[in-house]
Every structure is written in structure tokens, then in C-alpha cells.
Amino acid sequence: MDTTGAAAGDPRRAGVPVTGQRRRLALRSVRGAVGKGRDFTRQTLRDWGWDRGESAEDALLVVSELVTNAALHARGCHELVLTAGETLRIDVLDGARALPRPQAVPRPGVPGGHGLHIVQRLSDRWGSYAHGTGKVVWAEIEASRLADRQPGPRNEPFAG
């Protein structure tokens, strides 16, 4: 069965992937997990017809930030899961149960501490919950932003 949406006339090429379609990428102990996660996300967005606008770039940056945070602060990224529906749901499973908290005031010009603020700014919703021996950090981007090439999320601008 073709799940790529590449067939001519497939509604997914028009930005309407099959609701609930899910793709998973195992990243436990994988070198270059951030790049592999971005490549996987880019291809998935292309297959679903969601790769043509600024919001697709937002999704790639959100994936980069979440996978990087898992690698730096949570014993590594175990899995990246992308789910299509009313939103693009991005789930990153990692190996630490401590839930993430954005730094109260990221310091401009100082590396680090900006990742969750970027995720908050670029996604329509995000959060986290404990799962097994680790947690899931998730973000959602409205499908209409991806399909219609609408710029920007509805959240407040990132100051920093």
C-alpha cells in the first residue's frame, strides 16, 4: 500500500493527509539524530503535501529543538513520531522523566536556554508528560498552516 501520497490526484498532495497517519523514527543511540530527525520530517512533510510554506520550516526547527533537548538534557532521543490530523503532532520520546521547563529569562547572546522558547513560539501548542522510564515532549502545528502555507503561529513573539 502506498502511504507516501505521491500518486497523481492523491488528496494528500493537496495538503490533506490521511487523518491519523503516523510515522515513527527510532533514534536511540543513533549518531546525528538531529539531522536524521530533520531529514525524516522533511520527507514526511513532502509525502503529506505539507512542505511548501514557512510553517514547514517551523516544523523542521521544532523537531531540531526537541531532538537536541532530548540529546543534551534527557539521556538521548529514543524516538520521533509524526502524526497527521487536524494538526501535525510531533512527539519526541527520551530517557529522562524530569519534565522540561523553559528558562525564566533566556539571556540574549548567550548560547543555550532558548530551545523551548523557540518551540513555544513556532508551534500552536506544546507540552510534555511522563512515559515509561522517560517522557514525551510534544508540539502541534495546525494542519491549515501547513496546507495553506499560512505564515507563523498564533503564539506571542519570542523575545530574546
Image: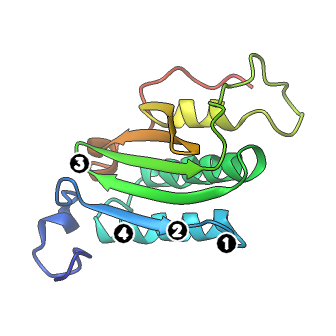
Instruction: Measuring from the top left, give residue 11's x and y in whole percent.
Output: 12, 65
Instruction: Measuring from the top left, give residue 99's x and y in whole percent.
Output: 62, 30
Q: CA distance from mark 4 to mark 2?
A: 20 Å
Instruction: Measuring from the top left, give residue 119's x and y in whole percent.
Output: 57, 37
Residue in the foreground of this view, choosing between 16 and 34: 34
Q: Which residue is mark 3?
A: 85
Q: Evaluate whether residue 151 shows in this view.
A: no
Where, by quadrant of the figure, is residue 44 drawn? bottom left
Q: Earlier in the sequence, mark 1 or mark 4?
A: 1
Instruction: Measuring from the top left, give residue 70's x and y in whole percent.
Output: 67, 49
Q: Which residue is mark 1?
A: 30
| The C terminus, quarter of image | top right
Q: Which residue is mark 4?
A: 46
Q: Evaluate whether residue 87 shows in this view.
A: yes
Mark 3 neighbour class, 10 Å CA radius: few under 14, some 14 to 19, many 20 or more: some
Amino acid type, residue under disc 2 in the picture: Ala
Q: Earlier in the sequence, mark 4 or mark 2?
A: 2
Mark 1 neighbour class, 10 Å CA radius: few under 14, some 14 to 19, many 20 or more: few
Q: Earlier in the sequence, mark 3 or mark 4?
A: 4
